[in-house]
Amino acid sequence: MTRKSIFRDSEGCVDCKACIIACKVKHMWPPYNTAEPVPEPRGVNLLRVYHYGPVISADGKVHQPFVSIACMHCEDAPCIRVCPTSAIYKDSETHITLVEEKRCIGCKACLWICPYGAPSFKEDGKMVLCNLCIDRLKEGKKPACEAACQARAIFVGSPEEIAELRARKSVERIARGTME
Ligand code: SF4
Ligand code: SF4
Ligand code: SF4
């Protein structure tokens, strides 16, 4: 398997939270509900949807962006550098950031350094992180979040595919006058 990168499209995301629920189901981290009286997914969440803006484009149109955020599997991951027990490492084939749970002592240094706030913690204090559904990728499937997103706001692929997608999206945004 080749190296993997991820693209999250803030113009496509509609805050439906299907990605969060699909992730919870895949990793068996209930509760799965998002219905009232608890509108936000509870418990361990490897993915979160953030709101920002509103953004006003050149032609005066108002856009409310959402973006789903999980581990971005950084090239030079600062969480790996700060972990005192070397619990975090890179998969040699895919470059996905992984955690060896039994080495984690729950100090949260990874959470403080992560620019995306990606590390999540179980009740026993152990850190858990999005692993891009590496088992599904090895079977030739999409990660659960990408497969669940009807807005196609999540895309996992090779670094070359992601670079091409980013460039295409930027050109489309400039053409529409919605470059942020
Ligand atoms: S499934 Fe897609 S559209 Fe829905 S919240 Fe997740 S990223 Fe956004
Ligand atoms: S946990 Fe944060 S710092 Fe570490 S690879 Fe993921 S996004 Fe990067
Ligand atoms: S919480 Fe666990 S994974 Fe994170 S820095 Fe501490 S020991 Fe490492």
Image (spheres, rainbow, N blue to C red):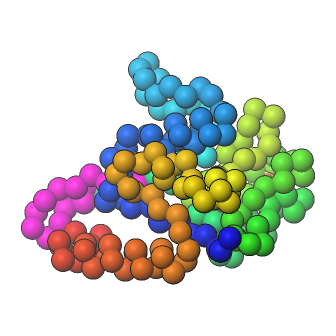
Measured as percent of width and height from the top left, residue 44 is found at 64, 37
Q: Does residue 103 appear to the left or right of 29 in the view shown? A: right
Q: Position of residue 91 (x, y in %)?
A: 76, 67
Taking depth in this image into account, of 93 and 73 the one nearest to the observer is: 93
Q: Which residue is located at x 55 percent, y 47 percent?
A: 144
- 117 is higher (above) or lower (below) than 170: above
Seen at 55% across and 77% down, the residue is 159
Q: Is residue 62 visible?
A: yes
The residue range painted magenta reads 54-67
Any magenta on residue 55?
A: yes
Residue 107 at x, y percent in the picture: 81, 49
| Image quadrant occupied by the N terminus | bottom right
Res 31 → quadrant: top right
Residue 4 shown in magenta: no
Q: Position of residue 155 (x, y in %)?
A: 47, 62
Horizontal arrangement in the rendering, residue 66 relative to residue 140 (left or right): left
Q: Does residue 45 show up?
A: no
Left or right of 38 on screen, residue 137? right
Quadrant hosting residue 142:
bottom right
The image shows residue 112, relative to residue 150, as above or below, that is below
